Image (cartoon, rainbow, N blue to C red):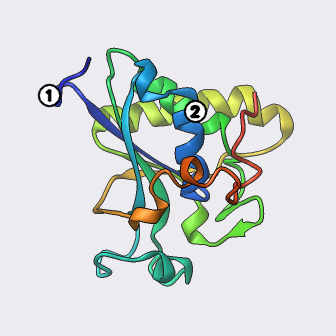
């Protein structure tokens, strides 16, 4: 099992954070030691003057924050490369500020990197995924790859929402696309 010293953080935005968190945890359940240790949904990547944003404010689009999932993972079990590829497999990274019927900057596709190594990996994997899965379809990945900034956990009722509310809303793009 990973220790706090070896765990790393990955942060992804791919539409509604409920579905993003849910699909990662369905495929990498912490109880099965598949590499994800824990997750949290929250807000990041917005106006730095806006502190401690809440769901209602983020949904107005006025703060520019993305709904995102922060993943603590054990790199000895699952690589960052694999998590980035999985991120791309589970949403449509070719739509600007949109996933399914959800529109707005809070639903953008983004990778928030926590090191220069993560940035390099994210860019390399993005280019590979673009060439293999999107160029042949005439589509272009529009995912932002930016350094991670300040993070705010979403309200408690959003954490693990689709596990607590299995019939809750789930964006139709949050599925395995290949």
Determine which quarter of the picture holds residue 65.
bottom left
Is residue 67 visible from the viewing direction of this image?
yes
Density class for disc 2 (Cα within 10 Å; few <14, some 14-19, many ≥20) is few
Density class for disc 1 (Cα within 10 Å; few <14, some 14-19, many ≥20) is few
Local secondary structure at mark 1: loop
> Is the C terminus in the top left, top right, bottom left or bottom right quadrant?
top right
For label 2, the residue is 26
Q: Residue 43, relative to residue 47: is it above or below?
A: above
* Foreground label between 1 and 2: 2
Residue occupying image coordinates x 51% and y 33%: 84
Sequence-wise first label, 1 or 2: 1
Local secondary structure at mark 2: helix
Residue 83: x and y in percent read: 49, 30
Residue occupying image coordinates x 41% and y 60%: 42
Q: Nearer the viewer, residue 113 or 78?
A: 78
Find the residue positioned furthest to the left.
5
In three-dimensional space, the C-alpha distance between marks 1 and 2, rounded to whole angstroms, equals: 25 Å
Q: Residue 118, relative to residue 67: is it above or below?
A: above
Residue 100: x and y in percent read: 76, 59
Residue 58: x and y in percent read: 48, 77
Residue 95: x and y in percent read: 71, 57
Q: Nearer the viewer, residue 75 or 41?
A: 41
Residue occupying image coordinates x 67% and y 62%: 96
Callout count: 2
Is residue 34 visible from the viewing direction of this image?
no
Find the residue positioned furthest to the right.
137
Q: Is residue 51 left or right of residue 131?
A: left
Numbered circle sitting on residue 5 = 1
Residue occupying image coordinates x 32% and y 15%: 76
Determine which quarter of the picture holds residue 101.
bottom right
């Amino acid at each position: 099992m990973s220790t706090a010293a070896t765990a790393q953080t990955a942060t992804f935005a791919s539409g509604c954070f409920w579905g993003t968190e849910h699909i990662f945890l369905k495929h990498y359940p912490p109880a099965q030691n598949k590499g994800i240790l824990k997750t949290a949904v929250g807000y990041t990547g917005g106006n730095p003057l806006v502190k401690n944003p809440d769901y209602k404010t983020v949904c107005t689009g006025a703060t520019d924050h993305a709904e995102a999932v922060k993943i603590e993972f054990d790199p000895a079990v699952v690589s960052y490369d694999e998590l980035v590829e999985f991120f791309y497999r589970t949403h449509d990274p070719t739509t600007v500020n949109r996933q399914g019927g959800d529109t707005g900057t809070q639903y953008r596709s983004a990778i928030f990197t926590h090191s220069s190594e993560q940035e390099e990996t994210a860019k390399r994997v993005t280019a590979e995924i673009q060439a293999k899965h999107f160029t042949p379809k005439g589509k272009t990945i529009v995912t932002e790859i930016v350094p991670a900034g300040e993070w705010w956990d979403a309200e408690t009722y959003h954490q693990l929402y689709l596990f607590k509310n299995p019939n809750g809303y789930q964006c139709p793009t949050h599925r395995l696309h290949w």
